[in-house]
Image (cartoon, rainbow, N blue to C red):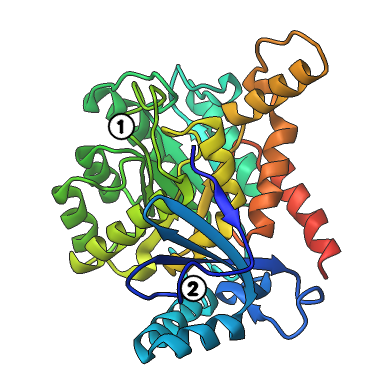
Amino acid sequence: MVFVNKTRYLLAPPYCKSVETYLSPVLGSSSEVIGGSRLAGGWRHFYNLRVIQKKNDTYNEVQMPIHELLKVAKSQSKTCLNIAEFQIEKLVNKRFSFAKLDMSKPHIMGVINLTPDSFYKNSQITNINTLFKKFNIMINNGASIIDIGGESSRPGAQKISVADEKNRVIGAIQQLKNCKTNTLISLDSRNLSTMKKSHKIGVDIFNDITAFKERNKIEFVSKIGSPIIIMHMQKEPRNMQINPNYNFAPIDIYKFFSKKITDLVKAGVKTSNIVIDPGIGFGKTLSDNLKILKYLPLFHGLGVPILIGVSRKSIIGELTIDDYKLRGKNKKIIKPSKRLSGSLAFGIHAYMSGVQILRSHDVFETNQALICQKALNL
């Protein structure tokens, strides 16, 4: 297990060749961070940075003000200063609108599963009347996006045929598009054929758990100019939780996205059409998930909006069971139906970390939590 040493001194000057340097802003409200910089043109501000450096297998973290980082970088070289300034700009620059949504404020993505084997039974939709009811409730309760999937990606799930996936989602999406609402529809799929068919009936966003790893999918979304969500996942849903392995998950995943975004842009995908999702629970241990959540502000350094989906996930059950054990109680399972409170806690943490899109099964409750938290930050 890798530990991050929190010290007073950098391993080396930032961005010099002997170390890798990453910045995670220390965030607060505008009243808490007087004279600070606005994060990504949004609702959080920062003055100090957690400067994380990697040298060989050693990780070091030093907290310092922005001006101090720039001063130290300048003392090393003009090149180091230029890189430091560029990285600060990526943290500060207002994000482009994504699918016409203003990324300077948070949005909720509601989840609708057209699957019989979704990990959360209450999210499973099996008939058109229930679908319309769920869809309208989510819209009325504040969802900016509705994410519709026809294949379960829970741990251990087996891949289904493309034909089965299409049978589940295409007709349903067609009927929802006929409602002509302002709420966007996202397709949760890893299959190009389903994407192409959905595009013809007006799907607004493509959400791919495999991060568009196939070249033909990249060429497709580049050609049509569609907004996309790229997620990080080790291996496949059927085996992703078998011995997931990272050096230090937040940095490993940051580097994955940095390369992926560069490759997508080179292939013709506009930066404004990219959102990243670190993939909580997708090929990660409990420790990995917690580290990613603790270092969420780090991912703003990629310069694109962030989506987080922790809703009803097993991390909440695992933490709850651990608490029972600490109190000498025997508890073997916390079902997804009993994970709402943890979902909201992590959702508020993501909001306080400046995350622009919260993916949730519980739109009303998530929106209410955001409303209350926003009121405290006025």
The residue sitting at 29% across, 44% down in the picture is 198
Does residue 35 lie above or below 104 as drawn? below
Does residue 74 lie above or below 190 as drawn? below
Name the residue carrying label 2.
95
The residue sitting at 47% across, 63% down in the picture is 53
Q: In the image, 187: left or right of 183?
A: left
Residue 9, position in %: x, y?
Answer: 58, 69
The residue sitting at 78% across, 62% down in the picture is 374
The residue sitting at 32% across, 72% down in the picture is 17
Q: How many neighbours does mark 2 have within 10 angstroms: few (below 14), some (14-19), or many (20 or more)?
A: many
Residue 195, position in %: x, y?
Answer: 26, 44
Q: Which residue is more in the foreground, 64 or 43?
A: 64
Tell which tag, 1 or 2, sits nearer the viewer.
1
The residue under label 2 is which amino acid type?
A: Arg
Q: Which residue is more in the foreground, 231 or 204?
A: 231
Q: How many neighbours does mark 1 have within 10 angstroms: few (below 14), some (14-19), or many (20 or more)?
A: some
Q: Quadrant of residue 39?
A: bottom right
Disc assigned to residue 235 = 1
Q: Which residue is more in the foreground, 181 or 97?
A: 97
Give the alpha-carbon distance from disc 1 to disc 2, as whole Å. 30 Å
Q: Quadrant of the C terminus?
A: bottom right
Q: In which quarter of the image is residue 352?
A: bottom right
Residue 46, position in %: x, y?
Answer: 66, 74
Residue 291 shows in this picture = yes
